[in-house]
Amino acid sequence: MISSLAIVAFAALIHASFQLSVSMLTLLSGHAIGSKTAHAKLLRLTSGFLFGVAVMTMLLISFIALVFQHVFGNTVPLVAWAASCGLLLGLGVAVWAFYYRREQGTSLWLPRSLARYLSERTKATKQSAEAFGLGLSSVIGELIFILAPMVISALILIRLPAFWQLTGIGMYTLISLLSLLIVSSLIGSGHKLSRIQKWREDNKRFLQFAAGSGLLILGFYVYVDQVVSVTAFAYGGH
Amino acid sequence: MQQAIDIIKSSGKRASEQFNRNKLHASVLAACLSVRSPEGEAEMTAKSVCDAIAIWLATKPEVTSADLRRKATETLEKHHPEAAYLYKHHRLVM
């Protein structure tokens, strides 16, 4: 039980290290402060964005877990574990290779047309409901990278009792929001956006390395824990 | 009266447009306010940057938007380095 929840927590921590939502929150706050928005409204916008991210994260992991439960029941076949580990390892290398663009700032892998569109949408966001929608779409935008930790977490969760499944989903959502919670509390407490953005830029290679390494470590651990050990046990039994 | 100066868009996909001092002022002001600069100080900084850019543009019939942004960043750097950082990188946040 503890080791299952620890894997879910680690996967959520990897999820938290991805930066599209943080970039969008930074832009949203920058435009709001720059257009003389009242502090209370700024807080409403950032809260709406955070709520949107939380809801979409919770919906996605619940949906993936539900699909797996329907397909596999409570016993996940080895091939599903192996495929998920392959996904983690592949994405780990992909994050190392091209998560950030090789230019100044914190430009992400996103196609430039999509980045421009999201940037314009963020700039045009004036209402909390729009910020909520923006939060929802930021999770979808990052789906290609967060899919792997979500898949592994879902595979782990479907083997747990119902209460612990809900606890795991809640824990995953909360931990995956950590980076956004930190940035929004810094903005809310009056820190300068330039310092937050400068920190992000100065540490982007470390964040990229940490996220990629996290995916590789998780993939390797789960492969050994769920595939190799089970296979070895089966052979040992004969 | 200042002559009309064409600003050529860097992407080349959008048509060029005439230099608009108000637009530059608003963008510099927003950058200053984004780093929690007091409103009066932000207004003064934006005005100083716009004045410097107007002098720089005086002898030019056309400039690219990238050059305009680079020159505005250089000028803003002297008045408010943190705002200049955001102004320079606002398209490179994601």
Image (cartoon, coloured by chain):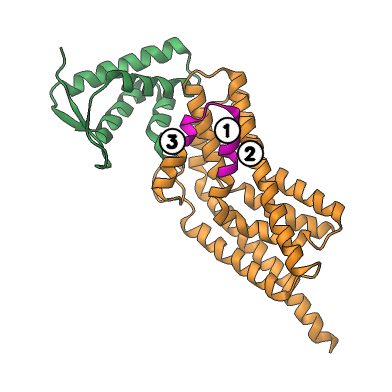
Chain colours: A orange, B green
| Chain letter for mark 1 | A
Left or right: A47, with A74 as reference point: left
Q: In this orientation, does residue A105 appear?
A: no
Q: Measure the alpha-carbon separation of dots 1 and 3.
A: 13 Å
Do residues under tags 1 and 2 come within 8 Å of each other at their CB atoms?
yes
Q: Residue at x 78, y 61 (%)?
A: A158
Circle 3: is it few (<14), some (14-19), or many (20+) Cα within 10 Å?
few
The crowd level at tag 2 (other Cα within 10 Å; few <14, some 14-19, many 20+) is many
The residue positioned 28% from the left and 19% from the top of the image is: B21
Residue A118 appearing in the image: yes
Is A220 above or below relative to A166?
below
Residue at 32% x, 22% y: name it: B23
Q: Nearer the viewer, residue A131 or B58?
A: A131
In the rendered structure, which segment of residues is drawn in magenta?
A: A121-137
Foreground pick, B65 / A6: B65
Residue pointed to by mark 3: A120
- Could you say which disc has been placed on residue A52 in the image? 2
Q: Residues within 10 Å of mark 1 (few under 14, many from 20)?
A: many
Task: Report x, y in % for residue A183.
Answer: 60, 34
Quarter where residue B68 is shown: top left
Marks 2 & 3 on one chain: yes
Kind of residue at badge 1: Ala
Is A182 in front, or is A20? A20
How far is the residue under mark 1 from the one under mark 2?
7 Å
Q: Secondary structure at mark 2?
A: helix
Q: Earlier in the sequence, mark 1 or mark 2?
A: 2
- The residue beneath circle 1 is A131
Q: Please, which residue is most extreme toward the front here? A: A70
